[in-house]
Image (cartoon, rainbow, N blue to C red):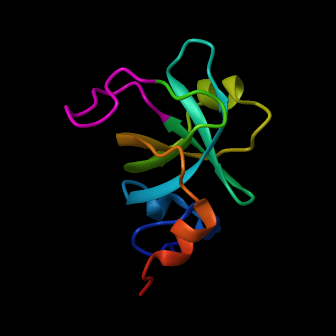
Amino acid sequence: MANIPTPGLLRSIEGLDDSDLELKIRTAGVVVDRSETGSSIVLRSDSSCLIVDCTIPMTDDSLSNYLPRLTDRLIVLGYLRPSTIEETRRHKSFECKYSLEALILKQTPGLNLVAWEESLIVD
């Protein structure tokens, strides 16, 4: 299992393997790619990228039916799963083996990602 602190940080997600599937992760990043069909985005923090699947229903207090724009800063909570062939083909400029199935997306325009990551207490 990868060494992912709680909450997980994208910059800490290295060495993921299939034993990490279904792991719940909260992370933040900048949208650097999105699908033309409006179903997924790629979130980036430091040098790591994850595909974030936004197709599931969102809760009332989240951004329902909202697909973030490029450069939007987000906090995301979701479950790790393998990226599908379609997702990796759609976002082929990124080598993403894993995706985050989003439960909550929260837009945070003024979020300083480095400060946010450094403020987290990691056990």
Residue 32, image quadrant: top right
In the picture as drawn, the residue positioned furthest to the bottom comes out as 123
Residue drawn at (19%, 31%), measured in percent from left and top?
60
Along the line of sight, the residue nearer the viewer: 38 or 91: 38
**Picture coordinates of residue 100, whole percent (x, y):** 47, 45
Q: Give the x, y percent position of residue 95.
A: 74, 44
Check the image and report above or below for 102 versus 20: above
The relative height of residue 32 versus residue 1 in the rendered view (above or below) is above
**Quick one: 90 or 62, which is closer to the camera?**
62
Residue located farthest toward the top when viewing the structure as drawn: 37
Q: Which residues are magenta?
A: 53-66
Q: What residue is drawn where x is 36% and y is 54%?
A: 22
Q: Which residue is situated farthest in the left direction here?
A: 60
Q: In the image, is 77 to the left or to the right of 60?
A: right
Label total for image:
0
> Is 54 contained in the magenta span?
yes
Indicate whether 12 appears above or below 79.
Answer: below
Is residue 103 shown above or below 36? Answer: below
Residue depicted at x 53% and y 54%:
111
What secondary structure predominates along the stretch shown in magenta?
A: loop
> Where's residue 27, x and y in %?
48, 57
Is 6 magenta? The answer is no
Left or right of 103 on screen, residue 59: left
* Residue most extreme to the front: 110
26 and 92: which is toward the camera: 26
Residue 3 on image: x %, y %: 53, 77
The residue at 50%/72% (across/down) is 4
Q: Please indicate whether residue 78 sits to the left or right of residue 39 in the image.
A: left
Quarter of the image with the C terminus is bottom left
